Amino acid sequence: MLSLARERNPGVEVFDCGPKISFSRFFADAGLYLDILQLLGVFNISDAVDKKGKEIEVDFTPKPGILTYPDEFKCRVSIREKHSDLIRHE
């Protein structure tokens, strides 16, 4: 495995414009961070359950490449009780 100093940064690869790097990468990172926080604050996200009621384990082995992501997997999403009235009425 490569050391962290030698690995390429996906943020630089996507927003790199030659000698100058676009500052929009900071807005993209902040917007994505806020979206994830809002989702996690309102919804419970947990492992999917099979027919016997046993949780299905997720394999988080990333695919190779500069921009990595895990294989497709199933999960269970439910509304948190604290926010259920707000979401159903809107």
Image (cartoon, rainbow, N blue to C red):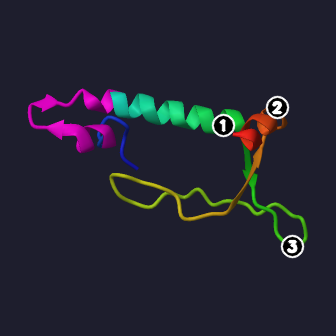
In x, y percent, where is residue 55?
Answer: 81, 60
Contact (Cβ within 8 Å) of mark 1 with mark 2:
no
Amino acid at pointer 3: Lys
**At 90% across and 71% down in the image, what residue appears?**
52
Residue at image point 40% right, 32% down: 29
Is residue 25 in the magenta section? yes
Image coordinates of residue 6 in percent, x first then y, are 29, 40
Which residue is labeled 1 in the image?
40
From the viewer's perspective, tell me whether residue 43 is left or right of residue 53.
left
Question: Looking at the image, is mark 1 or mark 2 earlier in the sequence?
Answer: 1
On the question of residue 4 being in view, the answer is yes
Q: Amino acid at mark 2?
A: Lys
The residue labelled by disc 2 is: 82
Q: Magenta part of the protein: which range?
A: 10-26
| Label located before the other in sequence (3 or 2) | 3
What separation in Å lies between label 3 and label 2 (alpha carbons)?
28 Å
Where residue 51 is drawn, which disc sits there?
Answer: 3
Q: Which residue is at the far left?
A: 19
Label 3, label 1: how far apart the Cα atoms are? 26 Å
Which of the image's four quarters has the C terminus?
top right
The picture quadrant where one finds residue 56 is: bottom right
On residue 22, the disc is: none
Quote the CA–CA distance across marks 1 and 2.
13 Å
In the rendered view, does 31 fall on the left or right side of 55?
Answer: left
Q: How many marks?
A: 3
Disc 2 is placed on an element classified as helix
**Residue at screen point 30% across, 32% down:** 25
Q: Is residue 70 above or below residue 23?
A: below
Of the residues tagged 3 and 1, which is closer to the observer?
1
